Every structure is written in C-alpha cells, then in structure tokens.
Amino acid sequence: MVLNKEIIGNFTPYRTDELKAFLKNAYAADVRQFYLYTNALDNTVIDVDHEYILKIYETKSFEHIKKAIELYENFKDYYSIRLVSNKEGKYLIDYKNKPALLYYKALGRRSNSLVNNLILMQKFHQFGYCGQRNFHLKVELNKIRAQTELYLCADLQAKLKGKARYKRYDAIFRRLKKIKYNDMMFEVAYGITHGDCNPNNILTYHKVCHFIDFDNISYNYQIYDLISLLLKYRERPIIEKEKALLRKRYFLQYENNDFDGFYDTINLMCCHKGLEMILSTEYYCFVINKFSEKVLDKYFMAVLNGLLENIEVRLKELKKCGK
C-alpha cells in the first residue's frame, strides 16, 4: 500500500485501489476516500468516508478478536460503536491474512468527567458481574514488576545507545528491585472488563456516556478497569466527591477504614501500571520517534522517578495501616 506523505491534521490521506476494491467486494460499498490515523501503534486504523472506521489487526490477534466479538454481542448496549456486517452477515473479515473489522463511526466527544466515567464503568461491570474472587496484591504487583524489569533489561538495553544513558535506567531497575511487598489479599469483583478503560475510550453524546474500542474486552478482575481509568487522573488528587462515589458505587462491601487502605493499594497498582506502560515497547517507540534524546531522557527520568517515589510512599502508608 502506498501512503500519501501529506499530513492533514491527525490524519494521513490513504489512497489505494486495492483497498477500495476489497471493501466494495466485501461490503458492496461505494468508497470515496480514506484517511490513516497517524497515532495508531499496534494496528492500522483507517477512516473511510468519514462515516466508518476500518481497523486491520495484527495476525496474532485473530483468536483474541473472535472472542472479543462474542463478548461485544452480549454487552453492546454499553458501547456507542456498532460493527458493520459484510455480505455474508459476518463481522470479522480477512484482509491479506489479517483480521479486519468495519465500525460505524462513533458520535460524541471524549468524556473527561471522572464521576461520569466511574458511573458508566460501574453499570457495565454490574451488568457482567460474575461474583467475588480472591485477589492477591503481592502476586499481581510482582507480575507487573517482572514485566517492568523485562522492559528495562531487554527492551531498553537494546534500544538505548551509550553506557552513560543506560546507567540512568539501570539505577531505576536497581531501585525497583529493592521494593518488597507483603502478601495482601482482598476479595474483589470478577466479571466483564473493558480492558482499555481510559477517557479516550469513553464518549459522551447528548449527556450519555458510552464506551468505544472493545478489542480487549474479557472476563477478569474488574479492579483492572478501575486502575486503567485512575491511571489517567494520577496527575491530580482524587477529590472527596470522587472517593465517595468509589466507596458508594464500587466498594460498598468495604467498611470505611478498610476502604481507605484498599484505595491506597489501588493507587499503588496505578503506579506500577504506569511504569509498565511507559516502559512498554510500543510507548517507548512512539515517544522516541517524537522527541529528541535530550528531551526524551528528561521526560522519562522525571516520570519514572515520580512513579517510583509514589510506590515507595504508598508502601509506607500501607505499612502504617498494618497491611
């Protein structure tokens, strides 16, 4: 496929007779124009006629996307997107041995209200609630730390050039290694999860909030959606109104004292997920192409150190609570 290099806003014009013929054959659609999202990291995302979104996934996603579609069918009332079926009535189509889906474009704007986003998430979780399961914080945090260390040791070491530059990241690695966790266990909700629950994937239209992007929908600990959402608000403190909503709608089974300790553990996991996200291959490659090495080092060091400080502070607070 040949991409036109001209950039218009956040889109790159994307013209190919081959793709046009494919859509005409699969959907009997009279396609006029394409635009490629320039910020797509994992998959190719194409705006078709400003009415549809065509998403072409990596081959490894085939089975995962099949399961996601099955779950989407059961929970689509909570999504503002709708899938377009092809001439055979199927959603999933094969484009050059890659899974592809065509969506009607979602209407609305990003919802920045944490309160509204929490209410939507809680309704979605209640609809797909399966019961309570034991959640071992130590096990989960160690999983996240192992992933973070993997990025630091293998991925970043391979990409970062120069010993002096790597030493700064090595210091982060050694600091992370020193962090020890107690085995804390909570009983938390298990059920349907969005899998990528952040404000970019929640749209509000006529004062009603809906999710978009169900690629990662699955059954899991529902706390992960909460962590993903709160991670986006970590630069500001959660106000009492939002804490009260969390307590009332989300953790009703916890007494006030227990909730405060549990809320600290959520923040602790947010810090770890932040470390994992910022050191992940996709995020690192995305940022390194956008900024100079000098800016990159300054940015990464500030964020990584800030997250590690938060982890250390949270652990001290939990120790005082006797957790």
Image: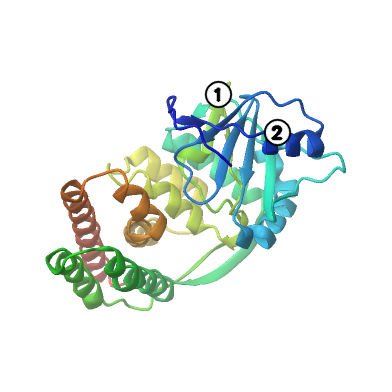
Report the mark closest to the observer, 2 or 1: 2
Report helix, strand or loop for mark 1.
loop
Q: Amino acid at mark 1?
A: Lys
Q: Residues within 10 Å of mark 1 (few under 14, many from 20)?
A: few
Task: Give residue 79's position: percent from left, percent from top.
Answer: 64, 38
Q: How is the image coloured?
A: rainbow
Q: Amino acid at mark 2?
A: Lys
Instruction: Say whether residue 210 is visible.
Output: yes
For the residues labelled 2 and 1, say whether their Cβ atoms are less than 8 Å apart. no
Q: Is residue 316 left or right of residue 56?
A: left
Earlier residue among tags 2 and 1: 2
Res. 257 image quadrant: bottom left
Q: Residue 323, relative to residue 35: is it above or below?
A: below
Task: Give residue 317's position: percent from left, percent from top.
Answer: 23, 64
Disc 1 target residue = 207
Q: Nearer the viewer, residue 39 or 95?
A: 95
